[in-house]
Amino acid sequence: MEENKELKKILEKINQKIKSGDINIAKEIFLFKKLHIEKLLESPDYNVFISSMFTTTGFLSFYILYLLQKKDYFGQEIINEISERTESCWIPNPGVIYPLLREMKEDKLIEGKWITKGTHPRFVYHITNKGIEQYKKLYSIIKIKFKEFRAITDKISEELFEK
């Protein structure tokens, strides 16, 4: 868990620097990558590739839009769904998910409402028309980029492991 806190701090620092216009983030990126490698060595079940794909590429917001166009979710359900679909190779940290959901809500890509039925109140998220439009635009681009990514990683995998 300590690694997650450290990774979160580094990501927050990177985001703060970018938002302030400071693009000198090489040190933070180096530390972020170093922590990923250390975690991989400590826990072989941790998949640095899946974690990186979701957290450093912007893919996570696209994937959340994908999930929300299928049905409405509350925050913990999104975390559980991603964990399940990645076969627990990556379990999103609430400290990553909830700020992203808040940002997506501010950008009017999603909206939400409190549901008070059940054991405790839950804030349920729903994709907006703007979110659907954004998803469709991103879908076309990411579909191509994902195929390119797979082709390159397949080529590298073949080179490294199938000789």
Image: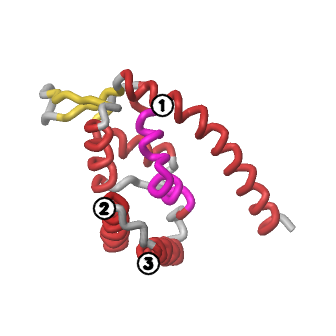
Dot 3 amino acid type: Lys
Q: Quadrant of the C terminus?
A: bottom right
- Rendered position, 108 above or below 160: above
Dot 2 amino acid type: Ser
Most distant residue in the top direction: 129
Residue 8, can we see it? no
- Rendered position, 64 above or below 161: above
Q: How many marks?
A: 3
In the image: residue 82, left or right of residue 149: left
Residue that label 2 marks: 20
Residue 57 badge: none
Residue depicted at 50% across the width and 43% down the height:
85
Helix, strand or loop at disc 3?
helix
Most distant residue in the right direction: 163
Q: CA distance from mark 1 to mark 3?
A: 33 Å
Q: Residues within 10 Å of mark 2 (few under 14, many from 20)?
A: few
Q: CA distance from mark 1 to mark 2?
A: 27 Å
Which portion, as a residue range, is magenta? 49-66
Helix, strand or loop at disc 1?
helix
- Rendered position, 58 above or below 128: below
Q: Residues within 10 Å of mark 3 (few under 14, many from 20)?
A: few
Residue depicted at 47% across the width and 40% down the height:
63
Residue 135 badge: 1
Toward the viewer: 116 or 124?
124
Dot 1 amino acid type: Tyr
Residue that label 3 marks: 27
In the image: residue 137, left or right of residue 150: left
